[in-house]
Image (cartoon, rainbow, N blue to C red):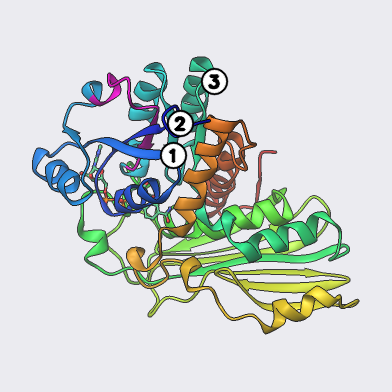
Amino acid sequence: MTSASRRILGFGIVGVGMIADFHARAIKDAPDCRLIGVCSRSSERTGEFARRHEVPFATTDLKMLLSRTDIDVICITTPSGAHLEPAVAAAEAGKHIVMEKPLEVTLDRIDAMLEATRKAGVVLMPIFQARTGENVLRLKSALVSGRFGRLVLASAYVKWHRSAVYYADSWHGTLKLDGGGALINQGIHGIDLLQWFAGMPSEVFSWNTRRVHTGIEGEDTAVASLRYPCGALGSIEATTAMHPGWARRIEICGENGSAVLEDDFLVRWDFRHVREEDKAILAARPDPTMRSGAGAPDQMTHVGHLRQISSLANHLLHGSALELDGPEARKAVALIQALYASAKSGRSMPVPA
Ligand SMILES: NC(=O)c1ccc[n+]([C@@H]2O[C@H](COP(=O)([O-])OP(=O)(O)OC[C@H]3O[C@@H](n4cnc5c(N)ncnc54)[C@H](O)[C@@H]3O)[C@@H](O)[C@H]2O)c1
């Protein structure tokens, strides 16, 4: 294809808060992608965002954004419980969608979103940027190849810090717009990886509490015990109440080997049968571009978003495979809803398959 006829993918962003900045930077750096327009409820903040990111079109009217024929993809970066409505409108306008995590705050709202995108025949790409990490992929591929043998324990720990100011806005920690607290907003990054690595647990038992952020509706701290269909066991711990916030940690223990991942750094990679390639992994240093928002949400970089948006562009422009779809991203919310149901009832809960 000559450069004159080269297709450029046009993007719009709905919601201009903290994570929208990451989308704007990712679109700017992704090959063949251009940010054409932004939309949010406040004309002042939308205009300021558009100026900062040199976006040609800014509006407070979603219909105006969706009516633009030069926009192919809409990134939705509104609060989690306000994802469905712009998603349905975007799908009905024939736009592909990049959706921030969690897809939505209830399974009913997620299913309505998946149905709208299916009916419209548009692509929905959920953001779970931790999945793009080099060592996350290495661990996944070692699991798929059976290198760990029978799984014994598979656990996720997301012990982060969020300030009182973070929860002082109109939506963080609310049931309607956040869907809960530390599990569904922060813990979900580890929970998604855990279910991707080890599969969905069949049964969970969970406790929730509010230790520090006592004014929020959701939990600031949660623990859970998990049982997997294969018989392996595991744990989840999630909090936003501790100081200073540690790297997200995933532990996979198997009969033939075990690994510990902190953000995208393999701090343990121990196998019964060591291979040549293991030496480089053990000698590696942490990759700062893949750090999570352990101490504050804006501590991460836009590299994971860039990889996901580039992958979507490759899919739409060149037909390459997409790594993640809506039904796969729904699983983390289904697991979290089982944890909430268990904590509320004081009983163990089956996890829907
Ligand atoms: N992938 C990640 O690591 C990551 C990190 C942070 C946030 N997020 C997700 O991104 C989304 C937005 O989070 P954020 O931190 O950018 O939030 P934010 O509060 O900084 O920004 C939210 C934006 O939505 C607008 N908004 C607020 N209430 C609204 C409503 N009721 N309806 C429509 N628009 C509304 C705000 O004006 C603002 O433009 C959430 O779903 C969150 O879970 C993902």
Counting residues from the start of the chain, the first of labels 3 and 1 encountered is 1
- Depth check, mark 3 against mark 2: the one in front is 2
Q: Give the range drawn in magenta.
A: 65-77
**Point 32% across, 48% down: residue:** 24
Q: Is residue 310 left or right of residue 327?
A: left
Residue 83 percent location from the top left of the image: 37, 35
Residue 130 percent location from the top left of the image: 54, 58
**Point 25% across, 50% down: residue:** 17
Depth check: 209 or 242 in front?
242
Q: In this view, does 5 lie to the left or right of 156?
A: left
- The residue beneath circle 3 is 118
Q: In this view, does 144 lie to the left or right of 31?
A: right
Counting residues from the start of the chain, the first of labels 3 and 2 encountered is 2
Secondary structure found at label 3: helix
- Depth check, mark 3 against mark 1: the one in front is 1
Q: Do the residues labelled 3 and 2 touch (CB within 8 Å)?
A: no
Q: What residue type is labelled 1?
A: Asp
Q: Which amino acid does label 2 sit on?
A: Arg
Q: In this view, does 221 lie above or below 348?
A: below
Secondary structure found at label 2: loop
Per the model, the C-alpha gap separating discs 3 and 2 is 28 Å
Q: Is residue 8 above or below residue 51?
A: above
Judge whether residue 76 is colored magenta.
yes
Per the model, the C-alpha gap separating discs 2 and 1 is 8 Å
